[in-house]
């Protein structure tokens, strides 16, 4: 094959080395900080005057990337973003940045932004300049930031990413439209502090504050327009930030919402290329969870049909080395595990746990419609009609005898596999698939 068109192959050991020395994390820091914080970094050199400037800058990049919060808080109008961002920035000791604060100074740039009608999103270039200017200041560099309600559109999100505004955590608050309507009608603001309260959900702390509150109810056409615009942009915003995004249901007590948000943003993220093993008995949902994870984090889903001798070649391709991979259903015994560990060294391993009787029920009661190709299950997803039910076909490998034999083999090797991976996470697979996915996500983001 012509070397110029041969697929690029990166040895899997390169990712292992990069993980060990935190290379990808450092490169991401350089990309973001050189664009946004070059002036602040130079100021630090001048003030500190270190004997070894290069080591000083490297330490500064590493510290600011792991310890300094960089959070986006998004959501529809009246969902509670402002109150949440205020509490979050106070607890994290980060700078609270809002669109209003970006427009509050007397610069020509802010004056130009204030001339844009409030019902319209700011032009991308103008918003970009405002955000870059504010986040490049020394307080945002040293303390971190919580950016509230920005970006508002998919295009703004992509532009911010290209400019080096790369959040570590993105929280999107969600609530039904009728809940948002009720909240907008009871909104009250303290004119002295800017704190937001609500007649029902968030009461002022004392009578003196209550007496000076002002009701702030946006005009209904303006509110509806803003809500519709946000709903249109949700898919694009989720896509732009899917690998660092957590969607939180805001239709619950404020304290519960805040605890979920705070727990998420306190998870430390490292730019490690994931190399994941997903193990478990037949019927535990390995294939489904591998697909969900690969879609969420853009990893390569590698099925267990690839045998060991071709795995190293497959996982050495450029997309696996740069995006990471998730291998499910392999290894199956101690020898395979040892060989895989020597060659590829996965950095995350999860066992999906499920009782044998549940595995049998999930597998032996499923069947496929040969006409539509759709899979049904006698309990959880029955055929829609007797006509479809009559033509359903069950695969030979889904028979009770075959599944029982496969389960017995898996249980025989489980202890040995767990000995090879003593730090593996154990996930309860006897729950809704989205619940399993949430558990996997929380382990990944906390690592």
Image: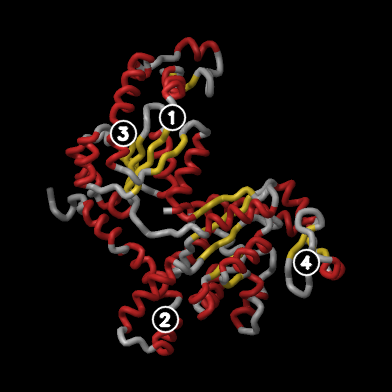
Mark 3 neighbour density, 10 Å: few (under 14) some (14–19) many (20 or more): few
Report how far apart the C-alphas of labels 3 and 4 lie in the structure. Answer: 59 Å
Lower sequence index among marks 1 and 2: 2
Q: Which residue is mark 4?
A: 189
Marker disc for residue 41: 2
Residue 447, image x, y percentages: 41, 53
- Dot 2: element: helix
Q: Give me the residue at 20% from left, 35% from top.
A: 335
Q: What's the distance in space between the residues labelled 3 and 2, CA to CA?
A: 51 Å
Display coloring:
secondary structure
Looking at the image, residue 413 sits to the left or right of residue 106; the answer is left
As measured in the structure, the alpha-carbon distance from the residue carrying label 2 to the one carrying label 4 is 38 Å
Q: In terms of sequence position, does the residue under pointer 3 or pointer 4 come before the other? A: 4
Which residue in the protein does label 1 denote? 354
Tell me if mark 2 has few (under 14), some (14-19) or many (20+) residues whose alpha carbon lies within 10 angstroms of its own.
many
Apparent side of residue 411 relative to residue 357 in the rendered image (left or right):
left
| Of labels 4 and 1, the one closer to you | 1
Mark 4 crowdedness (10 Å alpha carbons): few <14, some 14-19, many ≥20:
some
Can you tell which quarter of the image residue 370 is in? top left
For label 3, the residue is 415
- The residue that appears at 32% across and 32% down in the rendered structure is 414
Q: Earlier in the sequence, mark 3 or mark 2?
A: 2
Q: Nearer the viewer, mark 3 or mark 2?
A: 3
* Residue 394 position within the rendered picture, expressed as x and y whole percent measured from the top left: 40, 16
Question: Quick one: label 1 or label 3, which is nearer the N terminus?
Answer: 1
Q: Earlier in the sequence, mark 2 or mark 4?
A: 2
Q: Secondary structure at mark 4?
A: strand
Vertically, is 265 above or below 401? below
């Amino acid at each position: 094959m012509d070397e110029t068109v041969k697929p690029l192959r990166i040895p899997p050991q390169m990712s292992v080395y990069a993980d060990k020395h935190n290379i990808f994390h450092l490169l991401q820091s350089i990309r973001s900080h050189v664009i946004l914080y070059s002036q602040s970094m130079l100021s630090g050199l001048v003030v500190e005057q270190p004997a070894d400037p290069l080591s000083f800058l490297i330490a500064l990049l590493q510290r600011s990337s792991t310890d300094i919060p960089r959070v986006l808080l998004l959501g529809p109008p009246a969902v509670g973003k402002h109150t949440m961002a205020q509490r979050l920035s106070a607890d994290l000791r980060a700078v609270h940045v809002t669109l209003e604060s970006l427009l509050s100074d007397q610069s020509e740039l802010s004056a130009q932004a204030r001339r844009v009608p409030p019902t319209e999103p700011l032009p991308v270039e103008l918003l970009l300049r405002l955000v870059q200017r504010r986040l490049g200041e020394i307080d945002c560099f040293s303390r971190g930031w919580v950016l509230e309600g920005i970006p508002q559109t998919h295009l703004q999100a992509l532009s911010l990413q290209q400019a080096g505004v790369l959040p570590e955590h993105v929280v999107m608050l969600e609530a039904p439209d009728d809940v948002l309507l009720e909240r907008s009608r009871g909104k009250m603001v303290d004119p002295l502090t800017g704190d937001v309260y609500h007649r029902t959900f968030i009461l002022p702390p004392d009578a003196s504050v209550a007496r000076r509150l002002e009701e702030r109810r946006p005009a209904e056409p303006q509110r509806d327009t803003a809500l519709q615009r946000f709903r249109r942009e949700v898919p694009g915003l989720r896509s732009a930030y899917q690998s660092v995004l957590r969607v939180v249901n805001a239709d619950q007590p404020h304290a519960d919402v805040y605890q979920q948000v705070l727990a998420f943003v306190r998870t430390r993220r490292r730019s490690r290329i994931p190399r994941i093993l997903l193990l478990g008995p037949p019927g535990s949902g390995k294939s489904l969870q591998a697909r969900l994870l690969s879609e969420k984090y853009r990893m390569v889903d590698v099925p267990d049909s690839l045998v060991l001798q071709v795995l190293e070649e497959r996982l050495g391709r450029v997309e696996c080395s740069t995006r990471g991979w998730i291998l499910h259903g392999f290894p199956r015994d101690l020898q395979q595990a040892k060989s895989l560990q020597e060659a590829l060294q996965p950095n995350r391993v999860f066992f999906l746990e499920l009782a044998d009787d549940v595995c049998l029920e999930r597998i032996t009661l499923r069947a496929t419609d040969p006409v539509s190709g759709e899979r049904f299950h006698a309990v959880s997803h029955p055929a829609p009609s007797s006509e479809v039910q009559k033509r359903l076909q069950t695969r030979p490998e889904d028979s009770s005898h075959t599944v029982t034999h496969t389960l017995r083999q898996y249980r025989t090797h489980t202890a040995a596999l767990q000995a090879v991976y003593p730090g593996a996470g154990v996930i309860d697979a006897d729950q809704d698939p989205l619940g399993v996915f949430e558990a996997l996500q929380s382990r990944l983001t906390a690592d």
